[in-house]
């Protein structure tokens, strides 16, 4: 039987895993509601909290759906659906999948057919690597949090600087992938020299849109934009990628 990245069995397996995660969410929601009633929390506030939380999950859900669609061309629907429904993000999943397929001499986005072995390799790279963070939390999480709290007690300013520096360092690691094809401008190959500018231009469009969202929140007091800024900038960047690619490739 020929292997398919969209085989019904994969949908069933992924559906079971996603259902298990949803079941945990419902279980803890029911436990939380019972506990809230037991300690006398106002039922009106509880309903308002649940309704507000449900509404604001729409924004990240849009970004997740877009990410699933973006990866489905090369990896099928089940794998991106699983990865982005449990633990994962478009930035990480794309880099992990790209590293795996490039090691096999393939190009993400230009894969016509994967073998079962290639598919399993990609799945392992995308899943085992992201689990490192889950394994590290119980090992070093408490000690790291204690160290940060101690630093904050001694010098709150430097604690903020350290936290911001770590965040910027993480972002800088991802930015490297945006600029890694810059060398195409002076390195000959079977591609357009300007194609290395495509991700940079897409990044610039997304950054400008995010800046506009920030200005709307600050100047116009549209605080609701805060929850939709990410999917809006993501959509704008993906939409801009189409004409930019046609222009530079």
Image: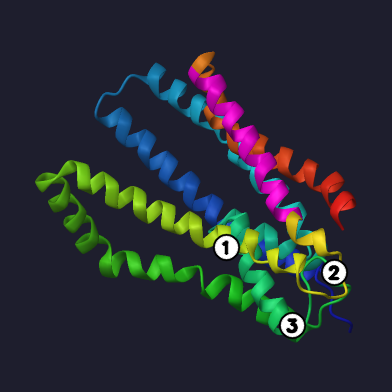
Callout 1: SS? helix
Residue 62 makes an appearance in the image: no
In the displayed structure, 128 sits above or below 239; it is below
Callout 3 touching callout 1 (CB < 8 Å): no
Q: Position of residue 112 (x, y in %)?
A: 89, 73
Name the residue carrying label 3: 118
Q: Nearer the viewer, mark 1 or mark 2?
A: 1
Q: Quadrant of residue 19?
A: bottom right
Q: Quadrant of the C terminus?
A: bottom right
**Residue at the spot 35% in from the left edge and 48% down from the top edge:** 164
Q: Residue furthest top?
A: 220
Name the residue carrying label 2: 110
Callout 2: SS? loop
Where does the magenta region start and end? 198-218
Disc number for residue 176: 1
Tell me the chief SS of the magenta region: helix
The answer to which of 35 and 96 lies nearer the viewer is 96
The answer to which of 217 and 245 lies nearer the viewer is 245
Q: Residue furthest left?
A: 154
Q: Quadrant of residue 181?
A: bottom right
**Residue at the spot 66% in from the left edge and 78% down from the top edge:** 100
* 204 is within the stretch colored magenta: yes
């Amino acid at each position: 039987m020929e292997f398919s990245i969209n085989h019904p069995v994969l949908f069933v397996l992924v559906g079971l895993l996603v259902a298990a995660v949803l079941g945990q969410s419902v279980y803890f929601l029911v436990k939380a509601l019972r506990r809230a009633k037991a300690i006398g929390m106002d039922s009106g506030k509880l309903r308002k909290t649940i309704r507000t939380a449900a509404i604001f999950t729409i924004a990240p859900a849009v970004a997740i759906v877009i990410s699933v669609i973006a990866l489905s061309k090369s990896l099928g629907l089940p794998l991106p659906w699983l990865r982005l429904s449990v633990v994962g993000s478009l930035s990480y999943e794309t880099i992990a999948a790209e590293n795996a397929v490039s090691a096999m001499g393939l190009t993400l986005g230009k894969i016509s057919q994967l073998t079962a072995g290639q598919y399993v390799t990609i799945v392992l790279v995308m899943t085992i690597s992201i689990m490192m963070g889950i394994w590290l939390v119980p090992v070093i999480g408490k000690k790291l949090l204690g160290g940060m709290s101690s630093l904050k007690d001694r010098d709150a300013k430097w604690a903020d600087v350290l936290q911001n520096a770590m965040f910027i360092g993480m972002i800088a690691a991802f930015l490297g992938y945006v600029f890694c094809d810059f060398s195409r401008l002076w390195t000959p190959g079977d591609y357009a020299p300007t194609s290395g500018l495509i991700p940079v231009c897409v990044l610039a469009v997304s950054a400008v849109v995010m800046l506009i969202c920030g200005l709307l929140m600050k100047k116009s007091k549209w605080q609701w934009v805060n929850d939709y800024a990410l999917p809006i900038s993501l959509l704008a960047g993906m939409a801009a990628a189409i004409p930019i690619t046609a222009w530079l490739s």
